[in-house]
Structure formats: C-alpha cells, structure tokens
Image: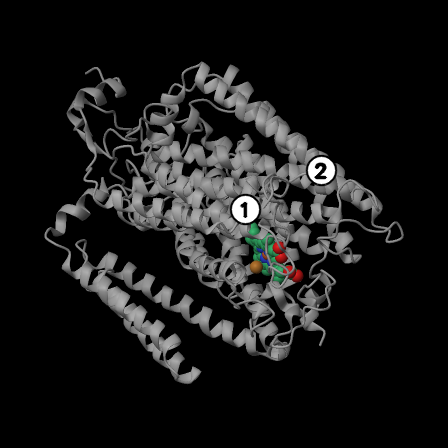
Amino acid sequence: MKWDEFFVTGDPLIYGADVSIALTTAGILFYLTYFKKWKWLWTEWLTTVDHKKLGIMYIVSAVLMLFRGGVDALLMRTQLAVPEAKFLDSQHYNEIFTTHGTIMIIFMAMPFLIGLINVVVPLQIGARDVAYPYLNAVSFWTFFIGAMLFNISFIIGGSPSAGWTSYMPLASNEMSPGPGQNYYLLGLQIAGIGTLLTGINFLVTILKMRAPGMTLFRMPMFTWSSLVTMVIIIFAFPILTVALALMTFDRLFGSHFFTLQGEGMDMLWANLFWLWGHPEVYIVILPAFGMFSEIISTFSRKTLFGYKAMIWSMLLIAGYSFLVWVHHFFTMGSGAVVNSVFSITTMAIGIPTGVKIFNWLFTMYRGKIEFATPMLWSLGFIVNFVIGGVTGVMLAMAAADYQYHNTYFLVSHFHYVLIAGTVFACFAGLVYWYPKMFGYKLNERIGKWVFWLFTIGFNICFFPQYFLGLDGMPRRVYTYSEESGWGPLNMVSTIGGFMMGVAFLILVYNMYYSFRYAKRETHGDAWNGRTLEWSTPSAMPPFYNFAKIPVVKSLDHFWRQKQEGKVEKLTIKDIKPIHMPSNSGVPFIMASFFFIAGFGMVFEWMWMGALGLIGVFGTLIYRSFEYDDGYYVSEEEIIKTEKISN
Amino acid sequence: MANKSAATEHGGFPWKHLIGFVLSIVLTLFALWIALGTDLSVTWILIIIFGFAFLQAALQLLMFMHVTENSRKGGFSGRIQIGNVLFGAFVAIVIVIGSVWVMSAGHAKHDKHDAPKTENQDGSHESEEHGSH
Ligand code: HEM
Ligand SMILES: [Cu+2]
C-alpha cells in the first residue's frame, strides 16, 4: 500500500478535517505539557476506576461523537437541500450516511446512556462503586478505542460506505473493497466487548450491591430500567459479536458465510444483524424511559404512578424485543405467514410502551409541576415520541411496509423515536444530574432556549420527511431530480436540521457559561429530589459516595425522610474505615493493544494484528497474577472530607 | 470491594477450572478433526459436532459457571439465576429456530447462490431484489 492510498486524498473537506485534527491535537499536547497536566491526566482520569469519573468520560466522549455525527448529518442535509446538488459525490455521501448512523447509535446514544447509568445507578442504590470497578474501566477504554478506530477511517484508508446495517453482499470484498468496511467490523467488535462487560457489571451491581432494605421493588425506576437494559445487552450483544466475526472471516480469511459464492447466505447477515438490532433499539430507549420517569416524578412532586405496571411493562418489552426483528426486512420475501406473525408481535410491543405513556401522564395529573429544563425535555419527549410510536405501528403492518420500507417515512420514524426518545433523555438527564457531576447547574434560561430551538428545529427537520417518504423519496440517495418535486420539503428539512445544530452549539456554550458564572451548589439536593443520589451532604459525592451506607425503608426513601423531617445527620460515631478499589493503568494499556490489533486487521497486516492481540493477552495474564485487594480510607480522612465537627 | 473475595475464598489450586479448560480444548479440537479430518457425510458431521457443543456447554456450566452453587442469601438469588438461565434458553431457541424458519420460508428458500450472481453490478443490492422473484 502506498502512502497516497493510506491517507485519504483529493477532497478539500477531508483536507480541512486533517488540518483541524492536527491543530486540535497539537493544542491539547501543548496545553498538557505547558500546564504540566500529564501526571494529573494519568492519575485522575486514565487510571481511574471511579464510576463517576468513568461516567463523565463516557459522557464527554458521547458529546464529541454527537458533534462528529451531527457534522455528518448537516453535510448530508446540505447536499439534499436542493435537487441535483454537487456538494458531495455519491461515494462520499454513502460514506457519510454510514458513519453518521453507526456513530450515532453505537458511539453516541449508547455511551451517553451508559455514562449516565455509570454516574447515577451506584448512587441510587446506595453503593460505593460498581461490583467490578476494574472491569468498568476496561469497558470504558475498549469502547473509547473502538470509537477512535472507527473515527480515524475518514482520514486514514477511507470510511465504510455500506450503511450502518452493512448488508451483504454490498459489504463484501467485491462490492466494498479496501479497508473501510473492516473499520466498521473491528471498531464495533472492540467497542462491543466494552458494552457486554458493562452489561455484566451493572447486572451484578444492581442485584448484589443495593443498600440494606432496598428490595427490588424499592429500586428507583432509572435503576430498574438499567437492570432490564443490562439483561437485554447480555443476551443481544453476543449475536452482534458473532455476526461481526463471521463477516470479518468472510472479508479477511475468505470464508463464505454471507457471500454470494460458495453457498453463502447474504440475507442471513440481515437476519442476524436485526436479531441484535431490534433489541438494540430497546437498549437505547429503556434507560431513556427510566430517566423520564425520575424527572417527571421529581418535578411533579409525586410518586410515580403505576410503579409496578411500569416494571412489568419493561420486563415484557425485554422479552418481546427478541421477537420482532423480521419487521426490518418484511420485503425480503419470507412469505405471508412469517410476515403476519412478525407484524402481530411488532404491534403487540407497542402496548407495554403505550402503558408507560399513560403512567407518565397520570404521574403529572394533579401534580405541582415545575417547568425546569429537564421537565421540558420530558414533556417534549411524550408528545414527539408518540408520533414516532404511531408511525412505528404503521410500519409494522407488513403489507403497508412494502410501501414505506426504505423511504424517508422510515427515516422519519426512527428519528422521532431515537431523537425524541434517546437524545431528549440524554439532554434531560445531563441537565438533571449535572449538579451531581460538577457541583453546579447548567443555566436554566439558556437551557430553555436550547430546548425550544432544538425541539422546533427537530420537527421542522423530520416532520416533512414523512411526506417525502409517502411521496416516494427513497432513503440513502445522494441526490434527486428537479421533476420529482421533492425540492421544497427537503429545503425545509435542511433548515430544521441547521436549527438543531445551532441548538447543540448553544448547549455547549451553556456548559462554558455555567462553568464561569453558575452559582455553586452548597448541598447535595439540587432539585429537591426523591432518590438516594440526592442524599449526599456535598453537591458532588466524595469518591467513596456514602460515608455511611443508608438503610432504605421504602420507595423514594429520601423524599419520605424529608417529608417527615427525619433526614439523618452524619456523626463521628458513624465513621468507619472504607474499603475502596485501587486505580490501575492496565485497562488503558489493554485497550491500546486492542487499537494496535484492530488497526492491523483493518489493513490486513496480520503481523500487527497478532502483535496487538499478544499485548492484550499479556495484560490479561498480568491481571490474573496481580494481587491487589484495594485499600482502606482512614477515619480521619473521611471526617475531614465530610467536614464533621461534633 | 466485591472483587477481593474471588481469589481468597476458594483457596488452593483451581483443579476444577484446569480440568474444565483442558476438556473444553480437547472437545473443540475433536470437533475440528471430525469436520476437517474425516470423510463422514455432512449430516453426520453436524450431528456429532452439535453433540460435542452441548457436552461442552454442560461442562462449562458445571466447571466454571457455578450451576450447582447455592446462594447464601436464601432462595431469592437462586430464583434470579433460574430466571436468567430460562431467559437465556428462550433467546437461544428464538435465535436458532427463528432464523431457520425465516431463512427457509417463502421466497427466501430459493435463495441459494451457487451460481455467480454478481454480474449485475448496479451497486444497489438491497433486499427488494429478493422480494421480486
Ligand atoms: C411503538 C414501537 C415501535 C414500532 C411498532 C416500531 C416499528 C418499526 C418498524 C416496523 C421498522 C422497520 C420499517 C422498515 O424498515 O420499513 C422500524 C425501523 C426502525 N426503528 Fe422502530 N418501532 C418502534 C419503536 C422504535 C424505537 C423505540 C426505536 C429506537 C429508539 C426504534 C428505532 C428504529 C430504527 C433505528 C429503525 C430503522 C433502522 C434502519 O433500517 O436503518 N423504533 N421500526
Ligand atoms: Cu425494530
């Protein structure tokens, strides 16, 4: 391979990206060196096993990925604004919609949610960390490295261009030559390890590390939704792992699982992909449901309506989510029987979802509603998500889907559920728990501007796409003719898209603004909350979370205590040494070896792949022989941190 | 915190794990040999390696996955274990039977590509193609 094939050349946009990446990297290196921050970076962040810090790193990465995916989106919207535009050529457009979809789902939505889960769930259950803190760090770093590997594709070697679904035979060596598709396979494979580990870690954490008295049916709804999500992750992700591995074999080692030759079955890829893919959409929506439940209950000052109904509907969804995958390829032609069965299961899954909508409405009914920013996002969610759900049920009718499939109608459906569901939840959760992470709130006035601009922009962008779809505009086309008549609605859609982009920039500005000017919180209960994470005396919990593990007597225990005026104060008698896990640099190093292995395999430099894998095994073996049982935080240190005087 | 117990609790040399590990490798190599090194018919090869697969799954549950272990907290986590295993079985059955059903029903059953079909390279191989036989 020659150098001019190694680096992507010839496109001014890419050169622009090259320059900005080089400048940013140089800037960061300069900052770290000039302000002597290397040591700080290593000891405080790269080696940390603290769930709160890992959570923050997840969220920061997800926001960066939201930016990257958002730029992709706006490039596509610019190209589509007018008929026969020449801004992007077809290959470039294909690459952009592929990276956009993959990044938004795998490297934005999931890490954002997992980040919030990391920060919040251990606090909500009154634990001092997760069950396996070291594994948690491995999870984060493999996700991060997988994301970086995927992201460099557009400047080194070229991006994948077969869509986030990577259907065969389009994704085969014959039709997608070069390293692009390999980036997809290896990037997702490495990040998938992290996700699976997170699933196991939080399942055990929630089942085993709850504070005394917190029975399963006293757990906050966000914790419940996380628990169910983890179960889905554990059973769905292995399917993706296997499917990716099989396609990797097809592309790298000449096997014929999904190829056209050698009796391969190309549609088996689609089948396996969606066996994972549909549970995946529930992985990214259930935690969102959980967050909205917390927020709506907090700002209505009422207990969640139908707590048990919520839980049962989630468990039902977890089971159902494995029974509907064929609705993504009704048009494959499995026949009337198969299509009818999956039509019915798909419509059935709408029922528990509908139950939850009513639960939120009844929670608000006669509540004292406070329209704080997180609550605005939740209300916006209810309205817009219903539109997404209703169009989902329309898609679920197999016969009708022959019309809607692969049109902008479908594009609009999944953006209504993913943006109004998952993205709204991420923003709501970020604003809601921001004071827990950083000790101050985001500015509410700016936050409300962001909400309105984003929500209005979102509807302007995606509502017209339903009509474009009904009018026959296919998805994944890089341009269309003047005569089609799709021009005006596309222009409207693009304008809406840019409004969302501006809203995102204001959100980021709000982070800066609030960092400079926001009033610092003086206690842990920023929103008059109900659950244990708000019960810590300081705004940001210390690294051990709770000096004394709370004893839980009911649902919304902290709220009850406040109502009865019985919030316990910490006294010196309560303080005992606390056992905590030690930091470790191994997860970071292991992930770096994964990067080397992945990069080598992307370019089919097998020596490099082998070298990286040897490194990975080396770190595993090192860990097996490491006897580190953590350390104790002394009583003096706790007393000092908690500022106890009596 | 929680991870300190694993090393200290059991003590001694992990014979159980070692035996399980070695047997797993042996079973895998055996399956490989059956598939590549013998002249049996495809049906028999499949039957035999599936047999090995189930054996190995049972072995791993027994040797590594603590199926026989009783929970300390009483019946509660036992129920969770059983729930998880049942859900796992449900998902596995759905994946296998579902895939076979979906991939062999309707038009899809004509969908074997022994003949090179790649010639019509219009670049838009999407699923519709198969629906329109
Ligand atoms: C009321 C519940 C829902 C129903 C009945 C439903 C139904 C459907 C159907 C039938 C399709 C396939 C349409 C086609 O390809 O022609 C589809 C696609 C999709 N749905 Fe949903 N859906 C629901 C909820 C959700 C949720 C909650 C999410 C994610 C948060 C989601 C994300 C997606 C995505 C990403 C796709 C398209 C993927 C692609 O082809 O690239 N859906 N939905
Ligand atoms: Cu689906």
Q: Quadrant of ligand 2?
A: bottom right
Amino acid type, label 1: Leu
Q: Please report the residue visible at 59 percent of the width from the left and 57 percent of the height from the top.
A: A166
Q: Residue furthest right?
A: A483
Vertical order, A65 against A357 (above or below) = above
Residue A591, position in %: x, y? 40, 41
Quadrant containing the C terminus of chain A in the rendered view: top left
Amino acid type, label 2: Asp
Q: Is residue A517 left or right of residue B52?
A: right
Task: State whether discs 2 and 1 lie on one chain.
Answer: yes
Q: Please report the residue visible at 38 percent of the width from the left and 45 percent of the height from the top.
A: A223
Q: Is residue A425 left or right of residue A639?
A: right
Image quarter of residue A151 = top right
Q: Secondary structure at mark 2?
A: loop
Residue A368, position in %: x, y? 51, 34
Q: CA distance from mark 2 to mark 1?
A: 51 Å
Q: Residue furthest front?
A: A2
- Label 1 marks which chain's residue? A
In this view, the residue in front, A310 or A79, is A79
- Residue picked out by circle 2: A11
The first of marks 2 and 1 along the sequence is 2
Vertical order, A408 against A514 (above or below) = below
Residue at disc 1, CB closer than 8 Å to ligand 1 = no
Q: Please report the residue visible at 14 percent of the width from the left and 59 percent of the height from the top.
A: B15
Label 2 crowd (10 A; few <14 / some 14-19 / many >=20): few
Residue A361, disc: 1
